[in-house]
Image (tube, grey):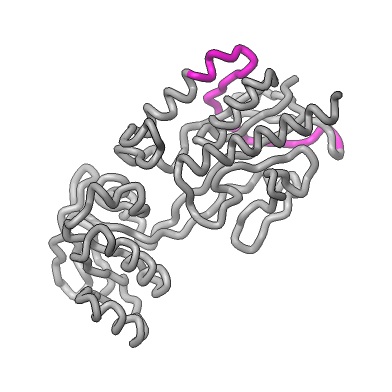
């Protein structure tokens, strides 16, 4: 039996595994490779690792865990999590029908994007991005698209990205802005196209042009999008954890959920997407909570 099973091998899950491993806890880390940053070429903003490829970052993290024989890594998909009895141990079942038992459970399953236009996904991470702190430097001073449908998202993205480039063109995909919103953008000479987007044209992830329903062709090849996000909270819901109206698993300041021995770390409990560094720090925080609880319960 494990002291803790961790579901999710992103920075939060890796950080928690490392901290708990060094605390001499018996840990099982499960990951199926569906982390949302896998499509990007480079990750930025993590000190000592600026510009690293996501798979290399993950590889280094997994390699470091090999120093701790009490930490086991499983590249497997989990299909079921249940308790032996109320407030009892957790039984985790994988797609290959193996079962693993633990006293504590940490969910670090992150979030996933939902795009207003599904074809955006073909260009996401190469031509179209969502985080200017992650990719703005590489796109500085270039002519950029802003693809967003809600006015609040458009204004937020434009104001933020204007720090990196003031050559911006907004595509609303058929949605109108208020007069006030249009005036605010016009003050900075930012053009708005309200036509519905007919097609994104490009090859191998690199955007060439955007075709509008009006027949107009937009010859821009880079830009930012404003996706919405969902949190894959299936396991948390099944275990009875409280979830707020925005889909966040509710926790106390130490990452404990409303269900005993269930913890959450990373973007699953954050109001907005976070950086690698923030997620890794949250994993460390959750691990300290888990280790503290184990210590208090067993001493």
Give percent across and percent down for residue 213. 22, 72
Count how many numbered circles sit on residues in the image: 0
Give percent across and percent down for residue 58. 44, 28
Query: Which residue is painted at 40% across and 68% down in the image?
Result: 153
Give percent across and percent down for residue 245. 64, 63
Query: Which residue is painted at 19% across and 46% down in the image?
Result: 203
Is residue 65 inside the magenta stretch?
Answer: yes
Q: Is residue 43 left or right of residue 28?
A: left
Query: Which residue is painted at 38% across and 61% down in the image?
Result: 226
Snapshot quadrant of residue 17:
top right
Residue farthest toward the bottom in the current orientation of the protein: 179
Snapshot quadrant of residue 77:
top right
Image quarter (top left, top right, bottom left or bottom right) of the N terminus: top right
Snapshot quadrant of residue 147:
bottom left
Image quarter (top left, top right, bottom left or bottom right) of the C terminus: top right
Q: Give the range drawn in magenta.
A: 64-85
Is residue 38 inside the magenta stretch?
Answer: no
Q: Nearer the viewer, residue 58 or 298?
A: 298
Q: In this view, does 57 lie to the left or right of 190?
A: right
Q: Which of 109 and 22 is in front in this view?
A: 22
Give percent across and percent down for residue 104. 74, 32
Query: Which residue is painted at 72% across and 50% down in the image?
Result: 252
Q: Is residue 210 left or right of residue 50?
A: left
Residue 142, relative to residue 1: is it above or below? below
Residue 283, relative to residue 197: is it above or below? above
Residue farthest toward the front in the current orientation of the protein: 47
């Amino acid at each position: 039996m494990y002291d803790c099973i961790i579901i999710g091998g992103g920075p939060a899950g890796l950080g928690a595994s490392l901290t708990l491993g060094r605390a001499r806890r018996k840990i099982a880390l499960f990951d199926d490779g569906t982390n949302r940053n896998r499509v990007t070429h480079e990750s930025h903003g993590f000190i000592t690792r600026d510009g690293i490829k996501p798979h290399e970052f993950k590889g280094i993290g997994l390699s470091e865990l090999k120093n701790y024989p009490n930490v086991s890594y499983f590249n497997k998909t989990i299909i079921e999590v249940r308790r032996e009895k109320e407030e009892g141990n957790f039984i985790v079942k994988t797609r290959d029908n193996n079962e693993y038992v633990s006293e504590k459970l940490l969910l670090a399953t992150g979030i996933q994007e939902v795009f207003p236009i599904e074809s955006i996904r073909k260009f996401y991470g190469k031509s179209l991005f969502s985080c200017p702190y992650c990719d703005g430097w590489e796109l500085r001073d270039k002519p950029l698209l802003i693809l967003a449908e809600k006015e609040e998202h458009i204004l937020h993205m434009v104001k933020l990205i204007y720090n990196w480039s003031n050559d911006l063109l907004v595509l609303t995909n058929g949605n109108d802005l208020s007069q006030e919103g249009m005036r605010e953008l016009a003050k900075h000479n930012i053009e708005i196209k309200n036509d519905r987007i007919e097609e994104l044209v490009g090859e191998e992830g690199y955007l060439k042009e955007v075709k509008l329903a009006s027949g107009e062709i937009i010859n821009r090849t880079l830009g930012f999008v404003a996706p919405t996000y969902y949190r894959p909270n299936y396991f948390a819901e099944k275990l009875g954890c409280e979830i707020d109206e925005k889909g966040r698993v509710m926790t106390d300041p130490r990452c404990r959920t409303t269900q005993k021995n269930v913890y959450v770390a990373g973007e699953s409990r954050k109001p907005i997407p976070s950086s690698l560094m923030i997620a890794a720090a949250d994993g460390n925080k959750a691990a300290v909570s888990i280790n503290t609880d184990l210590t208090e319960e067993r001493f």
